[in-house]
Image (cartoon, helix red, strand yellow):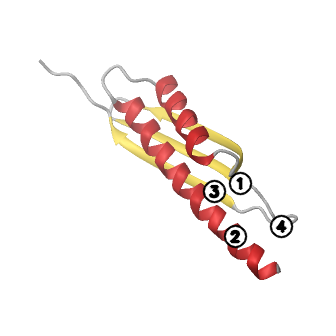
């Protein structure tokens, strides 16, 4: 029974990691567009994370940074545990070049 639960827990980790990667990429794109901001990237990443991960992630933390040339989003969390004291960490990050309008 423990082996079956370990397989299910591992599957949950893979789904949570995929959701975190997608949310980080969407957040980086939102922060990097012309007129984008750190707040826009944060909002987009949290929104996508909520829709895709749902209750798979516990205590997600989204960090967005933006410089003149690069926007980056980092997400850290843990998977929901179905086994006592067995929560796997999930980390994801994505970066995108900042768009600049040049007439």
Q: Position of residue 14 (x, y in %)?
A: 58, 64
Q: Of circles 3 and 2, which is in front?
A: 2
Q: Residue furthest left?
A: 103
Local SS, label 1: strand
Q: Earlier in the sequence, mark 4 or mark 1?
A: 1
Q: Is residue 47 left or right of residue 95?
A: right
Residue designated by label 3: 90
Q: Earlier in the sequence, mark 3 or mark 1?
A: 1
Of residue 29 and residue 67, the one placed in the foreground of this image is 29
Q: Is residue 103 left or right of residue 33?
A: left
Q: Which residue is located at x 71 percent, y 67 percent?
A: 9
Of residue 65 and residue 9, the one placed in the foreground of this image is 9
| Res 67 → quadrant | top left
Q: Which residue is located at x 49 percent, y 34 percent?
A: 65
Q: Is residue 40 left or right of residue 87?
A: left
Q: Which label number is shown at residue 8?
A: 2
Q: Of circles 4 and 2, which is in front?
A: 2
Q: How far apart in space, not on screen, are marks 3 and 2 (Cα)?
A: 16 Å
Q: How far apart in space, not on screen, are marks 4 and 1 (Cα)?
A: 13 Å
Q: Position of residue 21 (x, y in %)?
A: 49, 51
Residue designated by label 1: 78
Structural crowding at the residue carrying mark 4, measured as other residues with C-alpha within 10 Å and reported as few (<14), some (14–19) or many (≥20)? few
Local SS, label 4: loop
């Amino acid at each position: 029974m423990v082996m079956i639960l370990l397989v299910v827990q591992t599957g949950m980790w893979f789904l949570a990691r995929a959701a975190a990667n997608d949310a980080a990429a969407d957040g980086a794109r939102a922060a990097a567009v012309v007129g984008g901001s750190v707040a826009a990237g944060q909002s987009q990443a949290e929104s996508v994370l909520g829709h895709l991960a749902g209750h798979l992630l516990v205590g997600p933390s989204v960090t967005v940074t933006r410089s003149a040339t690069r926007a980056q989003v980092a997400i850290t969390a843990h998977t929901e545990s179905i086994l006592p004291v067995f929560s796997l960490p999930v980390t994801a990050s994505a970066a995108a070049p900042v768009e600049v309008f040049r007439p």
